[in-house]
């Protein structure tokens, strides 16, 4: 329960900071950074946060269902753009996958070789 | 009856049930297209259509799940912390890969959408498509996009990435486990991470890290690219 409180408190502080800074960065993102900082600085006990964090992250995909069901409502705004939206989404998603994958592999390969030389 | 099936308790229970059914169906058939999130969404949509329960009511009843989506983003901070040891030596490379991925994602989706004649507001809504929903919606609305459209595209992107991601990475020769996890999380956020976890512990952890980094970096990149490029 204490761990869940820490997560909520980080969310709350992040949301407050987000409001103060005009909302450009969502409260949840600032909360994520704050939780990370608090754990790294040992302000909060990582052992207490582990169980609730793991539980929440384990079922994160479920939280997308209501958002996806919004399709029935958003359909109107896509109608005339259906083709453009679908093609752009597919092309761009594949590009991100391949670019990030290849680039990170290239970096790791380089680091591996360097490590081997030493 | 209608009152019962449009109650918060019923709609929440029904949603979790369809999700579990989706997980079960996938395990049974091993068909990638039967993604649990996709199955659950389709079943809920059909249910709403058949019973006449309005989407606005459904959204209201499942506000708890929406709220938890925000909480789960915060919980990613724990994952970042837990994986720090593993990542420390690679921090620069991981950051640069995600920055490049974020820019490629934003620029490509806008250019292709414009080229195919999409309205400007629609093109703007697509920019954060690879970012987890609560962040993507905030980024989109801040840039003048349509939050509802963004959220749907985000879910579709996640499902697409989780279905085809590992096969695409195989075909393009990405075999390094950290690279695979990073690509899954960067392209397909939490839904892609659910798939990355199946690939292995390293892939899952790095993918989770990528959700956070991609969200953070895209939040900064969308306004930046708007000022420089578009």
Image (cartoon, grey):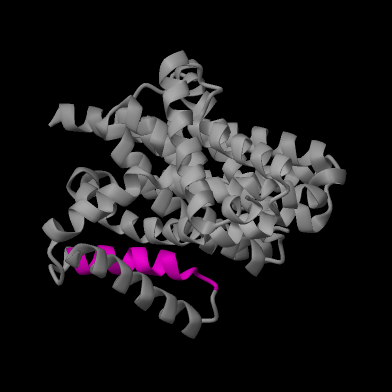
Nearer the observer, B190 or A70: A70
Q: Position of residue A47 (x, y in %)?
A: 12, 56
| Residue A24 place in picture, x, y as percent | 55, 72
Residue at x 20% of width, y 43% of height:
B86
Q: List x then y, in percent, for residue A8.
A: 32, 69
- Side of A46 relative to B6 (left or right): left
For the C terminus of chain B, the image quarter is: bottom right
Q: Is residue B22 above or below residue A54?
A: above
Q: Quadrant of residue A42?
A: bottom left
Please tell me whether residue B12 is drawn above or below residue B17 in the rendered image. below
**Rendered position, B15 above or below B136:** above
- Queried whether the magenta region covers residue A101, the answer comes back as no
Does the magenta-highlighted stretch encompass residue A29?
Answer: yes
Q: Position of residue B109 (x, y in %)?
A: 68, 44
How many circles with numbers are drawn on the protein?
0
Q: Would residue B94 be seen by someone viewing this image from the given angle?
A: no
Please report the residue visible at 29 percent of the width from the left and 65 percent of the height from the top: A7
Q: Main secondary structure of the magenta part?
A: helix
Instruction: Report the front residue among B112 and B145.
Output: B145
Indicate left or right for A56 with A79 as reference.
Answer: left
Give me the residue at 52% from left, 63% from top: B220
Looking at the image, the residue that sits furthest to the bottom is A20
Which residue lies at the image location 26% right of the left edge and 34% below the top edge? Answer: B202
In the image shown, does B116 or B160 lie closer to the viewer? B160
Q: What residue occupies the far front of the structure in this picture?
A: B1
Residue range highlighted in magenta: A24-39
Residue B45 visible somewhere in the drawing: yes
């Amino acid at each position: 329960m204490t761990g869940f409180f820490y997560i909520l408190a980080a969310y709350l502080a992040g949301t407050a900071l987000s409001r103060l800074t005009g909302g450009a960065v969502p409260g949840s993102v600032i909360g994520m950074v704050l939780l990370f900082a608090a754990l790294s600085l040992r302000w909060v006990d990582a052992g207490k946060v582990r169980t609730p964090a793991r539980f929440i992250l384990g079922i994160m995909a479920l939280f997308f269902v209501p958002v996806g069901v919004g399709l029935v409502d958003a359909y109107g705004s896509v109608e005339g753009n259906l083709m453009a939206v679908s093609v752009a989404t597919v092309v761009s998603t594949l590009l991100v996958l391949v670019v990030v994958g290849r680039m990170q592999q290239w970096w790791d390969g380089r680091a591996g070789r360097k490590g081997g030389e030493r | 009856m209608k009152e019962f099936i449009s109650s918060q308790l019923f709609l929440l229970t029904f949603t979790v049930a369809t999700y579990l059914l989706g997980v079960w169906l996938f395990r049974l058939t091993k068909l990638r297209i039967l993604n649990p999130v996709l199955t659950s969404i389709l079943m809920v949509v059909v249910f709403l259509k058949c019973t006449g329960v309005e989407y606005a009511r459904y959204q209201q009843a499942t506000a708890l799940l929406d709220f938890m989506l925000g909480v789960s983003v915060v919980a990613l901070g724990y994952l970042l912390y837990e994986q720090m040891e593993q990542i420390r030596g690679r921090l620069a490379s991981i950051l640069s890969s995600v920055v490049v991925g974020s820019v490629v994602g934003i620029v490509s989706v806008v250019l292709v959408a414009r080229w195919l004649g999409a309205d400007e507001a629609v093109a703007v809504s697509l920019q954060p498509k690879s970012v987890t929903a609560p962040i993507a919606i905030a980024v989109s609305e801040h840039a003048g996009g349509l939050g509802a459209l963004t959220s749907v595209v985000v879910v579709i992107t996640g499902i697409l990435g989780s279905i085809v991601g590992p096969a695409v990475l195989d075909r393009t020769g990405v075999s390094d486990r950290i690279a695979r996890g990073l690509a899954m999380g960067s392209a397909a956020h939490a839904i892609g991470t659910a798939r990355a976890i199946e690939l292995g512990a390293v892939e899952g952890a790095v993918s989770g890290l990528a959700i956070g980094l991609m969200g953070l970096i895209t939040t900064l990149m969308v306004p930046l690219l708007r000022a420089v490029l578009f």
